[in-house]
Amino acid sequence: MAKSRLAETQDRRRHFRLRYPSRKKPKLVISDKEYEIIDVSEGDVKFSCPQTMDLGPDAVIRGALEFSDGQVQQLQGRVLRIEVVMELAQGPPDKRVVKEQIRIRCQPCGPEPVTA
């Protein structure tokens, strides 16, 4: 019996993928430009990328993942797909991904409070 497309995708995934609510996303900084993170794991990062960024499969990217608590994680990886997904040779450790998951689940999902 042939595997479904979903089963094939799940077999390929080696790490838990953390998707961020829109207001809690860390930033990916590459060459002083900021990109919006879609999801992150210990093994890959998916981020939105304007069409002006000239990347092809296997292009090497170096940058920094800036978390909302101020911690910065240096990243290095290669482009897997043009949507852009990087397979990381160096990325956030499992402990950091779990910490982010806990932070996202524990914070209220409403709008951020306005401070005077």
Image (spheres, rainbow, N blue to C red):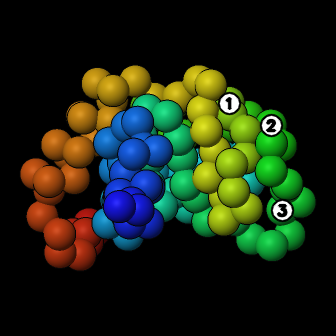
The label shown at residue 76 is 1
Query: Which residue is depicted at the point 12% across and 64% down?
Result: 108
The label shown at residue 59 is none
Type of residue at label 3? Met
Above or below 69: residue 54: below
Q: Is residue 106 left or right of residue 103?
A: left
Which class describes the residues within 10 Å of circle 3: few (<14), some (14-19), or many (20+)?
A: few
SS type, badge 2: strand
User: Which residue carries the number 3 mark?
Assistant: 53
Label located before the other in sequence (2 or 3): 3
Determine if residue 23 is in view.
no
Q: Residue 46's x, y, as percent?
A: 55, 54
User: Which residue carries the number 2 mark?
Assistant: 60
Query: Which residue is depicted at the point 83% across and 43% down?
Result: 59
Type of residue at label 2? Val
Type of residue at label 1? Gln
Q: Is residue 38 left or right of residue 4?
A: right
75 or 41: which is nearer to us? 41
Number of marks drawn: 3
SS type, badge 3: loop
Query: Which residue is depicted at the point 73% across and 38% down?
Result: 78
SS type, badge 1: strand
